[in-house]
């Protein structure tokens, strides 16, 4: 690969949503605290919830209600999602540096999209709130297809829908499942270290192609990995 090719932005970048593009934990917290208040529990602090957000709704319910049996909590998911929908976009926004990074990608002619394990209807509702509905080239949720991350199916279908080979795409995510899915799809990967992680997580062990501390770093073409 010549130097000129090495410093180009990728042809396409696919992103995880929660904990990667969007600091959505405050909206999740507001919904969970409504549920806690209904049970007479004190509000949960944001710091207690944040590490669990990328693990999904059941993990967040477990963090918010550790003394409730899993069998009981498992039936609360839809109630949580309904409350979260009411809070959608009220307390959250893109991480600092995300909008600048997306603008650089767009200016370079790169295509970008979202592949998330969040239910598709909730992800779609967020797009106009963020001003991304006409900018995001593809959006695939956790219930769009029969399989989801860490399975590569979502990433492969996203690449097909935007008409770009997986080897020419980069996937950015803050969870090990993101990096496993990217590797299985034949995509280069970026570990978003600014996202949500448990204390025991070891992002080095995930073996992503790049580990990036802040979105602003990705405003430079040289910061991006290229085809696997």
Image (spheres, rainbow, N blue to C red):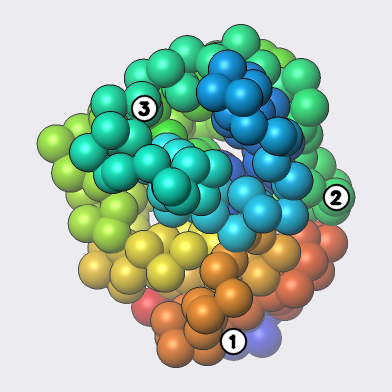
Name the foreground residue: 47 vs 127: 47
Name the foreground residue: 101 vs 180: 180
- The structure residue drawn at horizontal position 80% and vertical position 42%, both measured from the top left corner, is 99
Q: Which residue is mark 3?
A: 77
Residue with the most extreme front position: 40
Mark 2 closeness class: few <14, some 14–19, many ≥20 residues within 10 Å: some
Of mark 1 and mark 3, the one earlier in the sequence is 1
Q: Nearer the viewer, mark 2 or mark 3?
A: 3
Specify whether 36 is left or right of 65. right
Can residue 216 be seen by looking at this rendering? yes
Circle 1/circle 2 CB separation < 8 Å: no
Locate residue 85, reporting x and y percent: 55, 15
Locate residue 8, reporting x and y percent: 66, 68
Q: Mark 3: which secondary structure?
A: helix
Image mark for residue 2 = 1
Quarter of the image where the C terminus is located: bottom left
Residues under labels 1 and 3: Cα distance?
Answer: 50 Å
Of mark 1 and mark 2, the one earlier in the sequence is 1
- The structure residue drawn at horizontal position 53% and vertical position 54%, both measured from the top left corner, is 52
Q: Mark 1: which secondary structure?
A: loop
Can residue 9 be seen by looking at this rendering? no
Locate residue 118, reporting x and y percent: 42, 35
Residue with the most extreme left position: 146
Specify whether 200 is left or right of 215. left
Q: Which residue is mark 2?
A: 96
Does 146 appear above or below 215?
above
Q: Nearer the viewer, mark 1 or mark 2?
A: 2
Q: Mark 2: which secondary structure?
A: loop
Mark 3 closeness class: few <14, some 14–19, many ≥20 residues within 10 Å: some
- The structure residue drawn at horizontal position 22% and vertical position 57%, both measured from the top left corner, is 151
């Amino acid at each position: 690969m010549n130097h000129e090719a090495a410093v180009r932005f990728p042809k396409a970048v696919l992103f995880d949503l929660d904990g990667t593009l969007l600091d959505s934990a405050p909206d999740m917290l507001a919904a969970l605290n409504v549920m806690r208040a209904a049970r007479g529990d004190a509000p949960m602090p944001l710091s207690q919830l944040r590490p669990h957000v990328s693990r999904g709704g059941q993990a967040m319910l477990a963090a918010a209600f550790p003394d409730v049996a899993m069998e009981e909590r498992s039936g609360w998911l839809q109630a949580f999602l309904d409350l979260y929908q009411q809070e959608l976009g009220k307390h959250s926004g893109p991480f600092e540096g995300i909008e600048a990074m997306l603008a650089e990608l767009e200016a370079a002619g790169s295509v970008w999209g979202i592949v998330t394990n969040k239910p598709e209807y909730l992800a779609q509702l967020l797009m106009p709130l963020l001003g991304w509905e006409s900018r995001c080239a593809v959006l695939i949720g956790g219930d769009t297809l029969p399989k989801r991350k860490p399975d590569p199916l979502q990433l492969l279908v996203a690449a097909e829908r935007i008409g770009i080979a997986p080897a020419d795409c980069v996937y950015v995510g803050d969870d090990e499942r993101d990096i496993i899915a990217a590797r299985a799809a034949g995509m280069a990967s970026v570990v978003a270290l600014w996202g949500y992680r448990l204390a025991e997580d070891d992002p080095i062990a995930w073996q992503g192609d790049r580990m990036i501390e802040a979105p602003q770093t990705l405003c430079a073409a040289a910061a991006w990995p290229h085809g696997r």
